[in-house]
Amino acid sequence: HYPESARTAGPLIPQISDRAQAPPADPTGHGGHTVPPPGALTYAPSATLRAEVLANDAWCRYPYCGMPSHLCDLDHWQPFNHTNPEAGGWTVLGDLIPLCRADHQRKHLAEWVPTLYTDRRVQWRNRRTGQVIVTYPR
């Protein structure tokens, strides 16, 4: 549903292509924090945090999507735990990626499983086929 130019990943920006491969993000979804920073235990990100995520990611991070991030939901890579927020993914930069509404819903179907890395690339692995697609912040 997007023009082909918006669906292609394109070349890596120099800041990403020149750096060594970064490790996966904190698997707890705490973004490397040991103590929750202000707002981390609330589901909805603050306007400041939303702006920080959008500054890092200009587009929906699902493969082949070109939806501008300002039109996207911010998804917790590691799910937010509404019953016990300290136990789940926190509302911090290191656990949030923009996904358009359709791709946000698609992610929760779990056909494609994302892994967020500290350099903000996202590796999507297809559960059935093992195919891997990587999206980069741009």
Image (cartoon, helix red, strand yellow):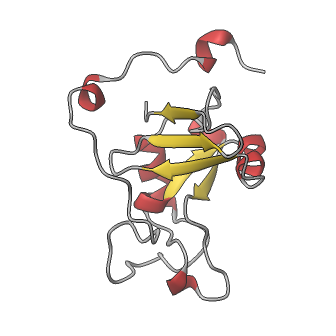
How far across and down, in percent of the image, does residue 56 sit?
A: 40, 42
Quarter of the picture containing the C terminus is top left
What residue is rendered at 43% in x and 35% in y? 137
Question: For the view shown, which residue lies furthest in the top direction?
Answer: 4
Q: Quadrant of residue 5?
A: top right
Q: Quadrant of residue 64?
A: top right
Quarter of the picture containing the N terminus is top right
Q: Is residue 40 left or right of residue 98?
A: left
How far across and down, in percent of the image, does residue 57 sit?
A: 47, 39
Q: Quadrant of residue 130?
A: top right
**Please, is residue 101 above or below residue 34 in the view?**
above
Total tally of numbered discs in the picture: 0
Q: Is residue 50 left or right of residue 36?
A: right
What residue is rendered at 38% in x and 58% in y? 25
**Please, is residue 88 above or below residue 53 in the view?**
below
Question: For the view shown, which residue lies furthest in the bottom direction?
Answer: 84
How far across and down, in percent of the image, does residue 104 sit?
A: 71, 49
Q: Is residue 6 left or right of residue 89?
A: right
Q: Closer to the camera, 63 or 98?
A: 63
How far across and down, in percent of the image, does residue 43 sit?
A: 61, 72
**Please, is residue 107 above or below residue 20 in the view?**
below
